[in-house]
Image (cartoon, rainbow, N blue to C red):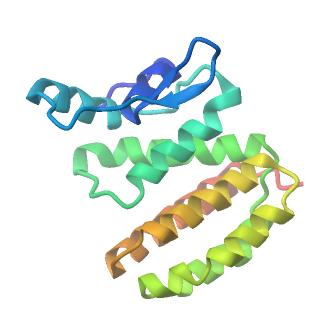
Amino acid sequence: MSETIKDFKDLGKAFGIEQADRGNAHSSKRGVSRTKDNQKNLRQTESKDVSNTNQGKDKGEVFFNYFKNKALADISDNELNSYIDNMKEYARFLKNKKFTTTKIRSIYSDIQKCQTPRDIKKLRPKFAYTGGRADNNAVRRFTDLLEELAKQATSSEDVEKIKDFAEGIVAYRKYYGDDK
């Protein structure tokens, strides 16, 4: 059973982001030689749930980084519930940011038609266009995330994972309703 992250610092450390004295995030340099304990702690932190973060202003960035690193990863059966719970929380976050399912309907439809990494990579301009038209930073970051996942896709399995991710976000976003 995965633990829940109490604040952004724990999750930030998992992705190599630390808070500077002035409040600006910067990447920490990680040495190549990690001890087994450090590797174990990193894996445990990476699998934690992001749903109980307490700083809403940075929550979108936390979700972006979480899914950027997890959406194409091989997720164990033990981590699957946590991953899906985070997807649900991300959809709730998007709803609260006035992100409607209408805004992603055409993108979602195009993603579902993709079969190869080349197909998904061809959608990158459409992701950029949709994000550029958005007056909402949450929409822009979501399309940035899709573009990043498309860049990372190297196999048909990756394409299926992107489809599953998009389907989960759309489904949970629809579940939360209120598309007025």
Residue at 41% x, 29% y: name it: 28
The picture quadrant where one finds residue 129 is bottom right
Relative to 77, is 26 on the left or the right?
A: right
Above or below, 173 relative to 164: above
The spot of residue 32 in percent (x, y) is 20, 38
Asked whether 163 or 133 is in front, the reply is 133
Q: Can residue 74 be spotted in the picture?
A: yes
Residue at 14% x, 34% y: name it: 33
Above or below, 134 relative to 94: below
Quarter containing the C terminus: bottom right
Above or below, 44 relative to 75: above
Relative to 72, is 55 on the left or the right?
A: right
Q: Can residue 1 be spotted in the picture?
A: no
Relative to 110, is 57 on the left or the right?
A: right
The spot of residue 36 in percent (x, y) is 9, 29
Residue at 64% x, 39% y: name it: 60
The spot of residue 174 in percent (x, y) is 69, 58
The spot of residue 126 in percent (x, y) is 70, 77
The picture quadrant where one finds residue 146 is bottom right
Quarter containing the N terminus: top left
